Image (spheres, coloured by chain):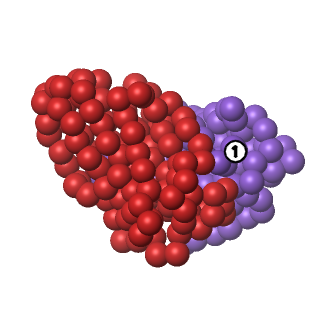
Chain colours: A purple, B red
């Protein structure tokens, strides 16, 4: 199956800082999504981004499908950005998830 | 609200028991996926249904089974429960069997005691 690697595994930020999360995947994919899991366990869909760049407020994402990686940018981080960020790719009728990046934003 | 409804939100049960988790997909979505998230295994794909038919199977135990009904809702049945089955179980839906965006429900947190 497709392997998904996320880095870094943990990230501690001061409120207002910017950060970049990376996702590498081992094969070509039809779909790539970024999710945020909040402290209550909910998985919130951030981006559907199999290629190209998208922006949503302080978050943006870029996927370079030919080089098999995606980046998630968080700008001007807030404490509400804390949680686990997952990258997931679609291969063979299912989403395969990375292990996640745990982000802690300190006030 | 993502449009994918899962019930119950929390479930506490004893070892050896059987439980049923329910999922209603987003309106218009024909595919339903079940995932298990445990502390040591991360998010693991269990099974997928498309329009009532099983399409793909992942690391689903034989003690677990699922089905999708004509109205497209799905149920995941977990039997002979063990302590290690304690996890967050997510349902997701998409329009087609291999599609362009999966939407997740809020999950059912199962605790086996």
Q: Pointer 1: what residue? A: A91
Residue A51 shows in the view: yes
Residue under the image location 36 percent in, 59 percent down: B23
Residue under the image location 69 percent in, 44 percent down: A92
Place residue A12 in its image quadrant: top left
Q: Is residue A56 above or below residue B15?
A: below
Q: Camera-side residue: B104 or B20?
A: B20
Seen from this angle, which residue lies furthest bottom? B27
Residue A46 shows in the view: no
Q: Is residue B103 above or below residue A2?
A: below
x, y (%) of residue B47? 50, 43
Would residue A32 appear left or right of A9 to someone viewing this image? right
Image quarter (top left, top right, bottom left or bottom right) of the C terminus of chain B: top left
Q: Camera-side residue: A14 or B66?
A: B66
Would residue B9 appear left or right of A103 to someone viewing this image? left
Residue under the image location 26 percent in, 57 percent down: B7
x, y (%) of residue A98? 57, 38
Give the class, few, some or many, for how many residues have Cα within 10 Å of label 1's Cα (few <14, many ≥20). some
Place residue A26 in its image quadrant: top right
Q: Is residue B34 above or below residue A54?
A: above
Image quarter (top left, top right, bottom left or bottom right) of the N terminus of chain B: bottom left
């Amino acid at each position: 199956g497709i392997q998904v690697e996320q880095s870094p595994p943990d990230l501690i930020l001061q409120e207002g800082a910017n950060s970049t999360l990376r996702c590498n995947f081992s094969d070509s994919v039809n779909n790539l999504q970024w999710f945020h899991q909040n402290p209550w366990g909910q998985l919130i869909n951030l981006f559907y981004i199999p290629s190209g760049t998208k922006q949503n407020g302080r978050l943006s994402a870029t996927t370079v499908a030919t080089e098999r990686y995606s980046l998630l940018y968080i700008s001007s981080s807030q404490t509400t950005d804390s949680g686990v960020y997952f990258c997931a790719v679609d291969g063979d009728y299912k989403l395969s998830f990375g292990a996640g990046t745990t982000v802690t934003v300190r006030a | 609200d993502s449009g994918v409804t899962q019930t119950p939100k929390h479930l506490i049960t004893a070892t050896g028991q059987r439980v049923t988790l329910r999922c209603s997909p987003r309106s218009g979505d024909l595919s339903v996926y079940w995932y298990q998230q445990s502390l040591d295994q991360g998010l693991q794909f269990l099974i997928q249904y498309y329009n009532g038919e099983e399409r793909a199977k992942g690391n689903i135990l034989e003690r677990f089974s699922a089905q999708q009904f004509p109205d497209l809702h799905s149920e995941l049945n977990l039997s002979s429960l063990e302590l290690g089955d304690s996890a967050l179980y997510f349902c997701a839906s998409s329009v087609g069997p291999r599609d362009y965006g999966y939407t997740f429900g809020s999950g059912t947190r199962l605790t086996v005691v």
